[in-house]
Amino acid sequence: MELMIDGHHLVLDDVIDVARNRRRIALSDEAKEKIRKAEQMVKDFVEQGKVSYGITTGFGKFSDTLISKEETGELQRNLIMSHAVGVGDPFSEEIVRAMMLLRINSLSQGFSGIRLSTLETLVNMLNRDVYPLVYEKGSLGASGDLCPLAHMALTLIGEGEAFLNGKRVPSKAAMEAAGIKPVVLSAKEGLSLINGTQAMCAVGCITAYDALQASKLADVSVALSMEALEGIRDAFDARVHAVRPHSGQIHTADNVRDLLDGSERITNQGEKRVQDAYVLRCAPQVHGACKDAIRHVVEKLEIEINSVTDNPILFVEDEYAISGGNFHGESVAMAFDYLGIAISELANIAERRVERLVNPALNNDLPAFLTPKGGLNSGFMIVQYAAAALVSENKVLAHPASVDSIPSSANQEDHVSMGTIAARKAQDILKNTQDVLAMEMLCSTQAIDLQENGKLGKGTQPAYETIRKAVPFFEEDTVFYPFIHQIADMIHDGSLLAAVEHTCTLKEV
């Protein structure tokens, strides 16, 4: 069933469904009518020679340069070509698909003046799996994501390159193969296509969604470590968290209790120790704070992806165009920095649990570095070393991008958000964090097998079994990296979480 687009009701799950599952979309009838009215308003402005930024004037510092009626189309084409200056690696297919969806959704509100036929061409590209080559670097996050969105628009006009069936080809060839005719731009359309926050939000949506899943997997990971280290269940008692009622904290404690239900490998307060170290005992407080932060970012994103971020904004009923600043990415730039900080803390505490698992001074009489034949074998010594490297890198990446700014366009655009950089950093932090969680699970399952002292919990048993299908117990040293990668793949593709949620329904917030 097609997802109806009207500019107002898109949620994070919809973005993932279109970006990853290739769900088809269609413009609602109401959206089409609004688009037609704004399209007519632009035509009227051009015919009347009315001075309006980006319609009958140049851009940025050239906003005082008037453009003739005959040159308005050329102006828009030149805008797209001159602004496509991206560098670095190409964005992934799912990010470009999300970017296209988000731009379509914003333009469908009818405040931009793009022609319906042009927007429907972009819809067809998305539905027929033509996605532009968009480089990840080159955006300041104001005036929106000019550079990456210009690369998106290049394919729309038959320029640049695109991917079709996974193959990189000239845009004209991709469009022709998909049976889509490139667009000849009209007044205001180039500006409508590139003035917005959709590149940063595409990265942010994918990262925030995966971060929510990672936050649940962090609960799985700490539960396995609890069993490996005979952790004390009392710290997860619901009464403890009811008197400090942060939702993320409460839900983390609920998750861990559910995961460990029926476990014979955890202990009671005073049975072997009075209390555990913070990395176990304070997991609800730390994981919970991360969950709350991620949910805040999702709330900000769901406002932004249903917003008008063009410039100028056309108010058809008043026949008035206002040149404002809705393209500025500050609102989500700060949120993406917060997202990166939250995700980095999931890795930070997980790495300390890895240290506790492998360190013979801390791991409750488990063999040093979790190897039965220490000395001859190093065991998981360097697994912790690698986890520490990733956590240290995350600390550098977690420095906020949004506190920076640099002027552009001859100082006309003199404060920018760096929102796309913030989103990309958060995604890099997430990848590192998924790897650290994989390393913790590698160590905890090894430690569990070294003990053999009772059954696992309702949720940890399927997690253990899923990991053990790909990763054996290690009697001696081997090449470990393929096994770390296999667990990380299970985290990234959702298969590990799916196995656990057959028996436990874990809460995100």
Image (tube, rainbow, N blue to C red):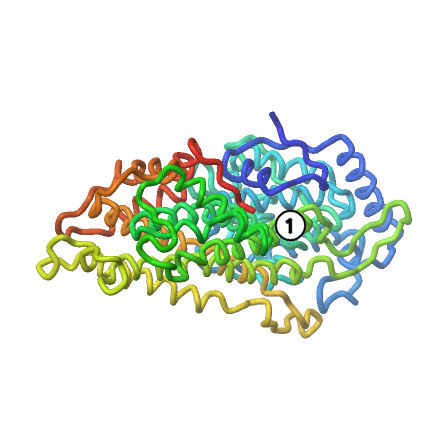
Residue count near mark 1 (Cα–Cα under 10 Å), binned few <14, some 14–19, many ≥20:
some
Which image quarter is the N terminus in?
top right
Residue under the image location 83 percent in, 45 percent down = 43
Q: Is residue 214 left or right of residue 126?
A: left
| Residue furthest right as drawn | 318
Residue under the image location 35 percent in, 52 percent down = 231
Which quadrant of the structure image shows residue 165? top left
Residue 95 shows up from this direction: no
| Residue furthest top as drawn | 1
Q: Secondary structure at mark 1?
A: helix
Q: Which residue is mark 1?
A: 299
Residue 463 horizontal/vertical position (percent): 35, 39
Residue 18 horizontal/vertical position (percent): 56, 36
Which sits in the foreground, 227 or 506? 227
| Residue furthest left as drawn | 376
| Residue furthest front as drawn | 270
Which quadrant of the structure image shows residue 257? top left
Residue 434 shows up from this direction: yes
Q: Is residue 42 left or right of residue 490?
A: right
- The correct choice, above or below, for 243 with respect to 500 in the image is below
Q: Amino acid at mark 1?
A: Glu
Count all numbered tags in the image, as a single digit. Answer: 1
- The correct choice, above or below, for 230 with respect to 411 in the image is above
Q: Is residue 69 left or right of residue 450?
A: right
Residue 476 horizontal/vertical position (percent): 12, 51
Which sits in the foreground, 330 or 486? 486
Which sits in the foreground, 300 or 351? 351
Residue 439 horizontal/vertical position (percent): 31, 53
Which sits in the foreground, 422 or 43? 422
